[in-house]
Amino acid sequence: MTAVGGSGARDEPSLAGGRAPLQLRVGGASREELHTRLAKLGIQLNDGARTLLEDSCFDTRAPEMLEVVQRSLHQLGLASGGTLPQVTAAARAQGLAPLPPDTGPYLRLAITDQGQAPDSILSAGRAPTGAVHVHSAPLRADHDYPKGFYLRVVDGVTWLRAFRCDDEYVWPADAVLALRAPEG
């Protein structure tokens, strides 16, 4: 499946359903263009997502095509869950890598068929159920600064949200991450 520019057009199953890798174009849009596209689709942002969108990594850059896959921690071999450093190591052992930090909005624009979260809790100090976390290198070492984005649909509202955690937080085995597949 290919999603170029986050149009939301669908001919094949999406990453959200875990059925097929997603060919995703990341980059090429200005910060303002991303805000406009997100708003046009009614996608809500939390304060953390707004903070991340102001980072210099969202300055316009040349677009690149990425193959994005989703994996649970269990699928990565972390049956008891794991910390972000453990997740990164387990993903790399399977040939997967973190996504560029600016992937979140492009992925949110591309996935328009994500299922409803099983609960309505928006912030609970834990990995939210029904979310797809965009695994990327943190933009700052500060644990109070958002680590990255996640995608979630709550009560019919589509969200692009940001999360915070430190390297000691143990993610549950059923947490789902979007990762970069190897080229070729």
Image (tube, rainbow, N blue to C red):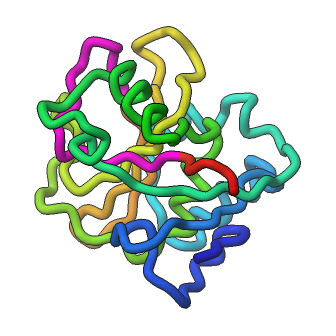
Compared to residue 42, the image places residue 51 above or below, namely above
Is 51 contained in the magenta span?
A: no
Residue at 56% from the left image edge and 15% from the top image edge: 140
Measured as percent of width and height from the top left, residue 160 is found at: 45, 52
The image shows residue 113, relative to residue 24, as above or below, that is below
Give the residues drawn in magenta, as a range. Answer: 164-179
Placement of the C terminus among the 4 image quadrants: bottom right
Relative placement, left or right, of 170 versus 114 is: left
The residue at the point 45 percent across, 74 percent down is 14
Q: Is residue 168 magenta?
A: yes
In the displayed structure, would residue 114 be above or below residue 99?
below
x, y percent for residue 6? 64, 69
Residue situated in front as seen by the camera: 147 or 21: 21
Q: Position of residue 129 (x, y in %)?
A: 18, 50
In the rendered view, tell whether residue 51 sits above or below residue 4: above
Q: Nearer the viewer, residue 138 or 158?
A: 138
* Residue found farthest to the bottom: 11
